[in-house]
Image (cartoon, rainbow, N blue to C red):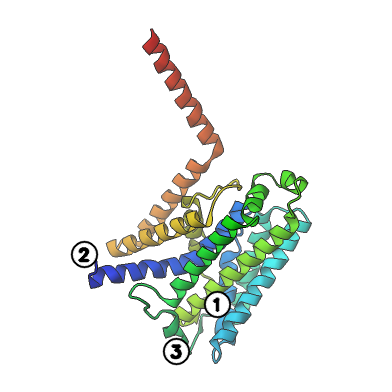
Amino acid sequence: CLVGSEMCIRDRFNTLQGLAQLGFLALPLGLTMIAGEFDVSVVGVSALGGMVAVQLGQEQPLLGVGLAVLAGVAVGLLQGAIIAKLRLASMPVTIATYIALLGLTSVMSGGLTVTYTNVQASLFVDQVILGIFSPRSLTIIALFVLAAVVLGSSRLGPELRAIGDDRRAARVSGVPVDGRVIGLFAASGAIAALGGALLSFSYSSANPNPGIQPLVLAAVAALIGGISLSGGRGTAVGLFVGAISVALLSQIVIFANLPGYVTQLIFATFLALVVLGDAPGLRARVSTVTSRLRANRKLRGSA
């Protein structure tokens, strides 16, 4: 598209709207991955946040959003305390929470999608600002900036990476591991619930079961952004780059009008390639093979 054209501006707006939907999952998931954890429950917390906001914020949207965030914080604190105090792996705990939250949102809604009737709030969260932004996209961008500043200018960033790299060594060196893990999951719950509330306002409805695809896309975004599956590596800036890349790719897929199964295959392949690239064993093997090839070339050259 031509720079400055109406179509180009619209594409940028849609890409940032995709970021607004994906970023509220990719950011909390990526932050927990930096610390060597994996918060599968972000999708369930997002669904819970949306359900709480829609059911309790029909007349007062801000109250609904606030209660949704409090619910997300409560879930995060509970998960973080269980994981940190009982020394449990985060994966099974957050999977259990994810399943439980989907059951809870289904009970709250009777298994049906709940309609949000406050048209003004729905229009507000998606109104166009400066041509390409909306309140939802500006909110997630602000959260990425906040995360980048906090992780880059305080002890929290190095401490989270230290926890992800070697939890025992971090504990010995004086890092308050339990407190950091609990706080991290609380922040994860708050961000995911806020995203779910804003998304439900945008759709004018709350879905009790958003499915597994949002989690897959969030994981792809985190891995593209340089977050390691083994923990100890990653930045908020990288997470933003990964999230905006996946949002842009999603827009390209929509523009190409590809069938749903083709879209799923594309993202599945993308995820598999990124995971393989992140595998430490594979990297070591590639490094060994490369070193041997270089050594052989040197021997041939000297001969």
In the picture, the disc for residue 50 is 1
Instruction: Report the Cα–Cα distance between label 1 and label 3.
Output: 17 Å
Residue on which disc 3 sits = 120
Crowding at dot 3, Cα within 10 Å, few <14 / some 14-19 / many 20+, comes out as: few
Of 100 and 245, which appears nearest the observer?
A: 245
The furthest residue to the top? 303
Mark 3 vs mark 2, foreground winner is 2
Crowding at dot 2, Cα within 10 Å, few <14 / some 14-19 / many 20+, comes out as: few
* Viewer can see residue 110: no
Instruction: Report the Cα–Cα distance between label 3 and label 2.
Output: 33 Å
Helix, strand or loop for disc 1: helix
Mark 1 vs mark 3, foreground winner is 3
Mark 2 vs mark 1, foreground winner is 2
* Viewer can see residue 15: yes
Q: Is residue 96 above or below residue 118?
A: above
- Amino acid type at circle 1 is Gly
Helix, strand or loop for disc 3: helix
Of 274 and 211, which appears nearest the observer?
A: 274
Residue on which disc 2 sits = 2
Of 87 and 233, which appears nearest the observer?
A: 233
The furthest residue to the bottom? 59
In the picture, the disc for residue 176 is none
Residue ID at (73%, 54%)? 177
Left or right for 167, reference 29? right
Which quadrant holds the N terminus? bottom left
- Amino acid type at circle 2 is Leu
- Amino acid type at circle 3 is Gln
